[in-house]
Amino acid sequence: MSPIVDSWRILLFVAVQLAIAALNLRAVPLLSRFRPSSPQPRVSILVPARNEQGSIAACVSSLVAQSYPDFEVLVLDDDSADGTAAVVRDTGGTPVRLVHGQPLPEGWNGKPWACHQLAATATGELLFFTDADTRHQPETLARAVAALQSTKADLLTAITGLEIGSVGELVTVPFPAWSILTLLPVPLAYWLRKNRALVAANGKFLLMRREAYEQVGGHAAVRDHATEDMELARHIKKAGLRWRLVNATDLVTARMYRGWCEARRGFAKNYFALFNYRLLVALFVWSWLMLIAWHPLVTVLSGMMRTSLPGSSVAALVTVGLNCLLWLLVATATGMPKRLCCLYPVVITASVLIGLEAIVRALAGKATWKDRTLVRRKVRLL
């Protein structure tokens, strides 16, 4: 295939990404736009916590301060080796209950097991799963319930805000939000109600109707999945139920990881599971992302060494501009650092390297998180 054909095909793909992003930014509303209304059913806020001493106090404090009239906060201490439980007891008030987790059964990953226990203890009509590293504005819950009711959703999930404190986080943490907004045509995903492939979910923000949760089998149905949030959303779609995505970056924030090493370990547990352990699919996607990030740049640089720019260099130059615009658009809409529009090749490369590490770990049966080995899943070619 000639370089011109390569460059123009890549340009077309990035242009389609830009169109998808523009479409999604209209289809994914800000959570803060939803106004609370009646009825306001009881909500159980469910927080799994394992070795979260450094972040759990801020999370619980923000949840206790919710303006919603009827809720409880349940925090499960998942066999923490630090002072997580003591911090919860010192921080929480009347709405907070500390649940002591039971030993992890065979065939379960840690987070699904923790969420399963929380759901079994909850008394709310709605279940709101969130993570111990999140912080919520006081109106988060009220607006989330309003959004669930307004959209008639059975599962409401959200893109949440990012706190970035190091270069290692800057080149890793933004990738998931970018991939959702530029690669997943959300209106099409809504329209194809039973298509399990077109879906997105964020375990930091999962608001579900209890009857829907129980109908799809809850976390027991996704017990051995590293990406249990995505699998729950897939089960929702398979059952013909309704899921919706909102932009909660102005109401919910989290510092997911601290530094490159922690971010690499965290994403390595997910980046092969996202492809349902299909080896060739994962390799193709990672290779293609590297191509669209680097091929235009290399083509432009090589073209600049000539007396005149060939057609491939012109297409590549336009592609670089569109890539910058794409990252700037997503960063502006989600509150991510705008300098990502210049760093995107590094972000893609870092994510691809983590994705390849995830494949190696899965093949070796050494995928781990929070000092636990994840359940080994069967790897398929397609």
Image: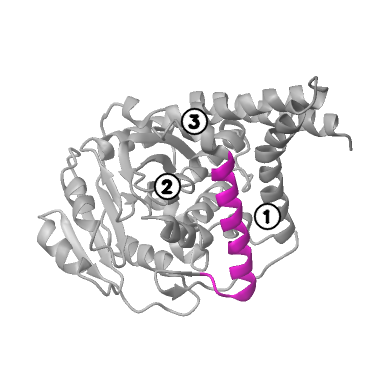
Q: Position of residue 378 (x, y in %)?
A: 65, 70
Q: Position of residue 62 (x, y in %)?
A: 20, 46
Residue displayed at 16% across by 57% down: 96
Q: CA distance from mark 2 to mark 3?
A: 19 Å
Camera-side residue of 246 and 196: 246
Residue displayed at 19% across by 69% down: 83
Q: Could one spot residue 146 in this view of the protein?
A: yes
Q: CA distance from mark 2 to mark 1?
A: 26 Å
Most distant residue in the right direction: 1
Q: Position of residue 185 (x, y in %)?
A: 60, 33
Q: Which residue is disc 2 drawn over?
A: 167
Magenta span of residues: 345-367
Residue 29's place in the image compared with 264, above or below, is above
Q: How is the image coloured?
A: one colour
| Label 1 vs 3, first from the N-terminus | 1
Q: Which residue is disc 3 drawn over?
A: 330
Q: Position of residue 247 (x, y in %)?
A: 41, 33
Residue displayed at 40% across by 74% down: 371
| Label 2 vs 3, first from the N-terminus | 2
